[in-house]
Image (spheres, rainbow, N blue to C red):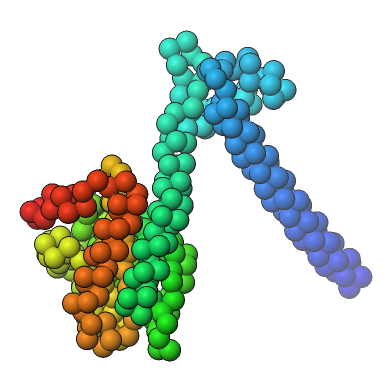
Amino acid sequence: MKSRGLSARATVAGKLCLCKLENRTASYIMERMNTTLLKGLKMLELLARSEKSRSISELVREFELPKSNVHRTLSALVEAGFVQQDANGKYECTLKLFELGSLITSRIDVRSRAETAMESLAEKTREAVHLGVLEGTDVVYLHKIESSEPIRAYSRVGGRAPAYCVASGKALLAYQADDYLVRFPDELTSYTSTTLNARSDLAEQLTEVRRQRVAINGGEWREEVGGVGAIVFDHNDKPVAAVGVSGPLERIQTSLQVNREEVLAAAHDISQALGCRDYERTVAQWEGRK
């Protein structure tokens, strides 16, 4: 009996030791990962700030790290597309950082330049006004002005919704490259009785959006919540955002014509503020596309 008791205690003690070892191992791995990530980011920043490409030897001296360590970090950055080698085998940043930075800058710029038009749109329609951008298959809300009405639709800045279900999302989808819709499955998820449930139906509706120049949400994301949205172009005539109004479906439909006109006018004004020279011409160029 005494032998079995000692054996049981030894087993428990062994399990506790193993558990502690696993925790220490996991902690060590996390620390190594964090250290590796920080080294990569610091190396990327140094290359970005450098006026010329840098050799491995220079980076070894700069970071006081083994050559093999620096080489592994650079290889990971090359594989991720952030760094490349020049003709002399030295390392330099690609334009990927510029591309990502431009995306962030353009979003901030759109929001600040849209403010005046959005405030005017909210005053004229008395509905909630949204500014959204496309992220994959979702629309993400960058800015919002609340409705002055006591009964209003709920949404928040930073929130997202399936792009095919809301007006601003459909306005954005209508002005993307021909192959953009392949990101969606053939059968779409239905959220209400009016949600489009097939990609082919969405494609047909987007053709109509381009013809009408505005998109309509007939309670397709949330029951009894409707909306109207229109596309916003930048100085390169590139679709960068959508502006729209949302509110109780009955109220949106009752004032549909006014909402359409005001939303389209706001999209025109924001596009103009972003440097779009001729909004009407830019929109018209998309109308005939199927």
Q: Is the N terminus in the top left, top right, bottom left or bottom right quadrant?
A: bottom right
Residue 277 in view: yes
The residue positioned 34% from the left and 52% from the top of the image is: 273
**Numbered marks: total:** 0
Find residue 129 and report its image quarter: bottom left
Identify the residue at horizontal 43%, vertical 69% (top origin).
144
Left-right relation of 143 to 175: right
Image height of 187 relative to 114, above or below: below
Percent of width and height locating residue 191: 30, 78
Q: Quadrant of residue 261?
A: bottom left
Residue farthest to the top, as pictured = 88
**Taking 61 as reference, is 194 left or right?**
left
Q: Pinpoint residue 117: horizontal percent, then vertical percent.
A: 36, 63
Using the rendered image of the protein, determine whether residue 67 is visible from the camera's viewpoint: no
**Residue pictured at 57% horizontal, 31% vertical:** 44
Q: In the rendered image, which quarter is residue 265 located in?
A: bottom left
Residue farthest right in this picture: 2
In the displayed structure image, the side of residue 239 where residue 128 appears, left or right: right
Say if 127 sits above or below 271 in the image.
below
Residue 121: % across, % down: 34, 70
**Pick the front one: 261 or 42:** 261
**Looking at the rendering, in which quadrant would you find the C terminus?**
bottom left
State the image coordinates of residue 81 (x, y, percent, origin top left).
44, 33
Quick one: 120 or 99, which is closer to the camera?
Answer: 120
Which residue is depicted at the point 33% across and 57% down? 270
